[in-house]
Structure formats: C-alpha cells, structure tokens
Amino acid sequence: MTQAIHPQDITGLILAGGRGSRMGGVDKGLQNFNGMPLALHALMRLGPQVESVMVNANRNLSAYESFGASVWPDVSSDFAGPLSGFLVGLERCETPYLLTVPCDTPRLPLDLAERLAQALVRDDADMAMAAAPEANAQGQSELRSQPVFCLIKVSMLESLVAFTHAGGRKIDAWTGQHRTVLVPFDAPQDDPLAFANVNTLQELQALEAQPV
C-alpha cells in the first residue's frame, strides 16, 4: 500500500507546449485572462499544492521563466502533444510524484493535488486522473475523465518512454495500461467551471464573463 502523499512529494507541471492552433497559432498560456496570463493563473493555483512547479513550453521560454518556474521544452520539436510534456516532466521530476495540469484552465481546483493523492493511496494506483461533469451531445451532464489533470508515480517513466517510442500519442491509451483511478470533482461545493479550458479567444472572453 502506498503511504500518504504530502505536498512536498509532488512536483507540478503546467503543460504549455501546444501550438495554440485553434487560437490562431498564438501561445495560449501567455494570453491574458482577467489581466494575467492563463499559465500564471494555473501556476498560482497549483503552486501552494505542491513542492515546486515546472512549465513545459516550446516557445517564449523566457516569458514563462519570468513566472519564477523552471521551463523545459519537449525533447522532440514536432509538438507531439501532452504526452511529450508528461515525458519531460517525469524525466525532470525530483519528487516521487508528478501532477500535470494544462495552461488553459485558470479555475483549476485548489484541492486538486490533495484529492488525487488521497485516491491514488486509497486504490494503490499508479496514477489518479480527475473527472468532471461535461455536457454531452444531448445537452445532458455526464462525468468525463480529464486526462491532462493527472497525478503520476515517477516510476511510470520507463513505461511512458516505451509507449512514446513505439509511436503512442494518446493519453488514455497509455494510462489504460496501468492502474488508474478516476477522481470525480462533482460535489455540490465544486466549481462547475474548474476544468473549463480555453481553446479560442471567444471561449476566453466567455469564461472571463462568468462569475467566480
């Protein structure tokens, strides 16, 4: 059984390495949300929950470094998706656990690390993944996994290296090979927009207009 996981056991990783293609190719993490870059919102919410925070970015590295975090680009230069960020994070992580979050969810839960860690210990899992309500095609709310919000044992590095070297790109295909526990964030007190992400400037403006 895994022992209790404390904040000092976890390194946070903000995933900001994408192309931002749906936002016109801009660097999404540096777009302002309520007067502050999206990625800085993520860092300020994640930072108190973990020992330290890294950023995975592939451009404007000095801008991300100005946030006070260490910044690491993908090993490959083909924008290979979130798993490339996972790989960088696991390779650079100096704690037993890595917690990944995207750069475009400025309202991410302030108890994300705590709840994922509790579930990972309880289920003796290799990783814990958030799940949150989302509207389906019929407009009904259903619980869906949020695979980029993931607490991972650093011992999973070897498995991820093998998976990506074999051409694997999909997070769910990799996590599905291991003991993964889904952690629901659908309690009455949970922010329904905690996992709302921003892919377009219109979505950014719409989220800014929502009450906190």
Image (cartoon, rainbow, N blue to C red):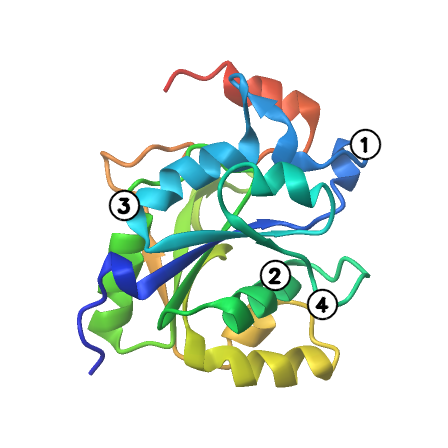
Measured in 3D between alpha carbons, the distance from the residue under mark 4 to the one under mark 2, in whole angstroms, is 9 Å
Contact (CB < 8 A) between labels 2 and 3? no
**Residue at figure coordinates x 65%, y 65% from the top left:** 84
Left/right placement of residue 95 relative to residue 5 reads right
Name the foreground residue: 137 vs 155.
155
Amino acid on which disc 1 is placed: Gly
Measured in 3D between alpha carbons, the distance from the residue under mark 1 to the one under mark 3, in whole angstroms, is 33 Å
Q: Is residue 184 visible?
A: yes
Left/right placement of residue 3 relative to residue 81 reads left
Residue that label 1 marks: 24
Q: Which mark is residue 85?
A: 2
Residue that label 4 marks: 75
Amino acid on which disc 2 is placed: Gly
**Residue at figure coordinates x 37%, y 38% from the top left:** 45
Name the foreground residue: 160 vs 63.
63
Measured in 3D between alpha carbons, the distance from the residue under mark 2 to the one under mark 1, in whole angstroms, is 21 Å
Local SS, label 4 = loop
